[in-house]
Amino acid sequence: MTETIPAERPRLLPPPTARSRALRERLAGLVRGRAEAARWERPAFLGLLLMTGVLYVVNLGVNGWANAFYSAAVQAGSQSWEAFFYGSSDAANAITVDKPPAFLWVIGISVRLFGLNSWSILVPQALMGVASVAILYRIVRRRFSAGAALTAGAVLATTPVATLMFRYDNPDALLVLLTVGAIALTLRGIESGRMRWVVWAGVLVGLGFLTKQLQAFLVLPPLVGVYLVASPRPVLRRIGHLLAAALAVVVSAGWWVAIVELVPASARPYVGGSQTNSFLELTFGYNGLGRVTGDETGSVVPGGTTGAGSWGSTGLTRLFGSEFGTQVTWLLPTALVLLVVSLVAVGVRRRRDPRFATVLVLGGSLLVTGLVFSFMGGIFHPYYTVALAPYIAGLVGIGAGLLWQRRAVLAWRVVSAGVVALSGAWSFALLSQASSWQPWIRWVVLVAAVVGTVLVLLPPRGRGLTGATVATVLVAALLGPTAFSVQTTTVGHTGALPSAGPSVTSSGFGGGRGGMPGGQGGPGGQGGPVGQAAPGGQGGPGGAPGGQTGQNATGQNTNGQGAAGPGAASGTDGGGNAPGGGTNLIGGSTEVSDEVVTALSADADDHTWAAATVGSNSAATYQLATGDPVMAIGGYNGTDPAPTLSEFRALVAAWKVHWFIGGSTSTSGSGSDAAAEIAEWVAAHYEATTVDGVTMYDLTPAS
């Protein structure tokens, strides 16, 4: 009898292991969200991040090199690891930028991976914006409703100055991300009572110092104060945790500072922005206490702590003025009201309530940072106010959520009506400052505010009415800043002083800052009175007197518009500081003619620097155009003693510098005169050549 052999059964996949099942559940959870959450919550959150990414990335290339000063440093870092580490302006390491280099490291890694172009420089900034929105959402959502968290994220994403800076290569984008991260970690430490969270928060604050120095420490008073008040640990344990966090700040910030200070000056680039080649001087002087007192040695325009100084009137109404108001204050009055509302709703006496800690740390951060910005007498630009955006957004989201949950009570509905009316009225006022731009928007906001005020007064009834109320209130509160944000993405922004949104007129809350004085022409340059054209550049109007709104320091309109660079339309950014004879040292055209590029590139490999010129912005323009190192004499403002005349003469004698490009010299009342001395020496010993309107001196022939 023949035995029948059964056919071989197909081999089945091995049963899923516990690890693979956990992984699949975790991935599904990323899309689904928490089991107890509403089904719409996670898709709404992901949609918020997607829309934020679209807002920050679409048309990004219109900004070209954005801030060419930093883009040139990124380029230098892509060519030299030493320049990468120190944040040098050029690959030959003559001088650093006037900030620590942490933000340049992030962008520099992107450029080394994807090559030097506008997108590789700016996309990391956009991703920082998306991450900041996500972290703020998480901060609010841990203790408040999904609606509150989504509102907070939407407010941050659509704040005009946030849209601007998360599409720009300034250090502020990374600073916001690190600050929001430090707040999130501190709150986790308060909830858990574990030291590790506050230690990691200290690490982020330290990295913030390596991004923008002492501004990163503005968040420390509220973080420390709230931890001492709200942590569940005994007092001595709390103090111990904070000491450990302080050590983390020192270590994470101090390692780089120690290297810079310990390495001999001859073995590293000059510390830009300092007068003594010291990073500590830069920290406590030009970029530190000088920003508060106005005593900033080397600044192009000395500030003042009272009256309408060079950087605007100081005082409680400063941030509401025309130059700053449309950047960030759309919901600032609302946030201040909702701070009080939230503390009352949560309960001031419930200091162990994590909700109380969240409100207090956001409110404290807003008040500390806002007051410093309001009264600082030194350099203060509108885009600095992006630091306030996450605090405003968080308070608005939390306060709105708490009011919504209490809408069944008439007293809370009355408060809600007042908040809606306030938001709409202030938005209408800000939109009226740009009355010639899309005037219909402000009327839509006004109508929505009136209707929304009435709707929130009505008792809750029916899903349809609820949806109409939410939609109307959102239009009243967010249409204005969203419109300004969208406009910001449609226009190129370049130079040192960008500003979000269309041009605005005076608000009557105190004037904007006056403009900088016109620069003096260097050798062969013809920069004269403010607004006068110079060879190779178009003169831009100077600033209006302090207390009035007009052109800003670079000659730009107050929106800082104008694009040039890779993939951008040609033209100046309004500064009138085209290469070779502009009227000031900040901003300027990022366009260099082919004739000038050809001249600078000739025999560039035979020299350490293809050229030298006064001021970092001018040097950056030529460096980005040629790809070769260009020495920024005097650093950012042309007021640093780097190099001195004797040092420059030695470099020229060694044939290390090929060309000197004539242009602006500083009009500062402080700082070094080395740049002017070098310019005079070059003019006296070398013959000027004009290349396509640019005054150049060939330094290779003997004098």
Image: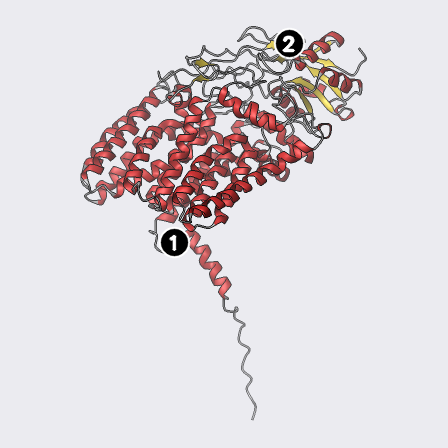
Q: Secondary structure at mark 1?
A: loop
Residue 3 in the image: above or below residue 153 = below
* Residue at image point 34% right, 49% down: 40
User: Of 689 and 593, which appears nearest the observer?
Assistant: 689
Amino acid type of the residue tagged 2 in the rendering:
Gly
User: Of 569 and 582, which appears nearest the observer?
Assistant: 582
Spot occupied by residue 622 in the image (x, y as percentages of width and height)? 65, 22
Label 2: which residue? 525
Residue sitting at the far front: 236
* Residue at image point 45% right, 35% down: 221
Label 1: which residue? 34
Spot occupied by residue 589 in the image (x, y as percentages of width and height)? 57, 19
Residue 154 in the image: above or below residue 535 = below
Amino acid type of the residue tagged 1 in the rendering:
Arg
Q: Quadrant of the N terminus?
A: bottom right
Residue sitting at the far right: 702
| Residue 115 seen in this snapshot | no
**Quarter occupied by residue 648:** top right
Spot occupied by residue 155 in the image (x, y as percentages of width and height)? 38, 35
